[in-house]
Image (cartoon, rainbow, N blue to C red):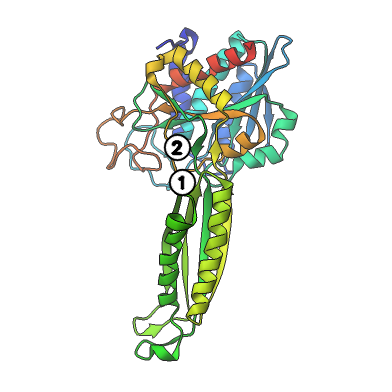
Amino acid sequence: MNLIDGIVRHRAEIQAIRRDIHAHPELRFEERRTADLVAAKLSEWGVEVHRGLGGTGVVGVIRHGSGARSIGLRADMDALPIAEANAFAHRSRHANKMHACGHDGHTAMLLGAAKYLAETKPFDGTVVLIFQPAEEGGAGAQRMIDDGLFERFPCDAVFGMHNWPGMAVGRFGVAMGPAMASSNEFSIRVEGRGAHAALPHLGVDPVFVAVQIAQGLQGIVTRAKKPIDAAVLSITQIHAGDAVNVIPEYATLAGTVRTFSDDVTRLIEERMRAIAQLTAQAHGASASVQFQWNYPPTVNHRAEAEFAASVMDDIVGAENVTRDLEPTMGAEDFAFMLRARPGAYVFIGNGDGSHRAAGHGPGPCMLHNPSFDFNDELIPLGATFWVRLAERFLAR
């Protein structure tokens, strides 16, 4: 691997910052300590600092030369409401809060790059360092955009990076189009008429109707959309009744819809409303549907994705870079930034979990898992990628 020596020399310092952030996790829009730490380090290294975008967001700006081009590099800072199972020294100090997705590592990699860029300024233009709050369900990226992120700090392109468990350390991956799916939620309330369970003909059973609706919804995925359009419709909750001998007044269903296209999401919502309402009507009940669009699909711009891959090639070799990485049905709010500016969202291998000491707790080292820990081997590699990306982008 072609790592930058100046970044490697500071690995211990950046690793200590990463582990400090891991030990003090903060949930979405609560990242005050983390933001204070990020801002303090940037200021210490001579980086221009701006606070408050998206509530707890931090933006660092490094300018050099007369170049008019600019690039945005983004890392997320928030943790998850998970009780950590690990036993190492930097485990979470806060009950039911944990960096189980590696945002501590994402922040550390970008800080490592920021330190080197501020000291050497190996570019001609502007680097915008975006430390974002509330990726985990808070749409912090959109909040920063709404607060004028790209008006105040124009970016010709913006890039994000996420660690990926199961991908070997020293490998990168990038999709040349859709990278992650949209995230949408729905709930359906079926209103029936209660009755004694022994006399169902005197009521309208909302449980029976809910089951028919649940079956019908799967037909949207298998029969209403094009087979080549990916979509997942998962019913994850069904609630009804309090007694085994009573037909309840109502039943509810809830779940999630994931797609790579707004058109497919729109089709699913429309058909869901029709199936729920007409199925309920056919059985003498009524149904109301709440459908919430959360994160849009994360779709890379091909030119920027190919550019990022070429930078990866130079660092780890083309044989260690997966182009056209298979998209995942998970969601990511970097999607909002890619709707506002050209760019790409890339993945860096976090390994198989062998970087953790014995006694780390049960379970594999996967994202959103109580045994997860970011692999510190990635810090110099990820920081090197950020630096080389900025250098080459601003040299074009």
What is the three-letter code of the residue carrying label 1?
Answer: Ala
Image check: 326 left or right of 135? left
Give me the residue at 41% from left, 90% from top. 201
Determine the residue located farthest toward the left in the rendered image.
358
For the C terminus, give its image quadrant.
Answer: top right
Q: Position of residue 64 (x, y in %)?
A: 69, 11
Left or right of 341 on screen, residue 7: left
Number of the label disc, if any, that sits on residue 230: 1
User: Dividing the picture into quarters, in which one does residue 274 lie?
Assistant: bottom right
Q: Choose mark 2 or mark 1, whichever is in front.
A: 1
Q: Secondary structure at mark 2?
A: loop
Question: Of the numbered discs in the image, which one, if any, rests on residue 329?
Answer: none
Q: Is residue 290 above or below residue 148?
A: below
Measuring from the top left, give residue 260's x and y in whole percent: 52, 43
Mark 2–mark 1 CB contact (< 8 Å): yes
Task: Please say whether residue 276 is visible from this viewpoint.
Answer: yes
Q: Residues within 10 Å of mark 1 (few under 14, many from 20)?
A: some
- In three-dimensional space, the C-alpha distance between marks 2 and 1, rounded to whole angstroms, equals 10 Å
Q: Nearer the viewer, residue 47 or 148?
A: 148
Mark 2 sits on what residue?
A: 327
Residue drawn at x 61%, y 14% is 118
Q: Is residue 228 rendered to the left or right of residue 244?
A: right
Q: Position of residue 113 (x, y in %)?
A: 54, 18
Among numbered discs 2 and 1, the one appearing first in the sequence: 1
Q: Could you classify mark 2 by the number of other residues whose Cα lies within 10 Å: few (under 14), some (14-19), or many (20 or more)?
A: some
Element carrying mark 1? loop
Q: Which amino acid type is marked by label 2?
A: Pro
Relative to 42, residue 28 above or below: below
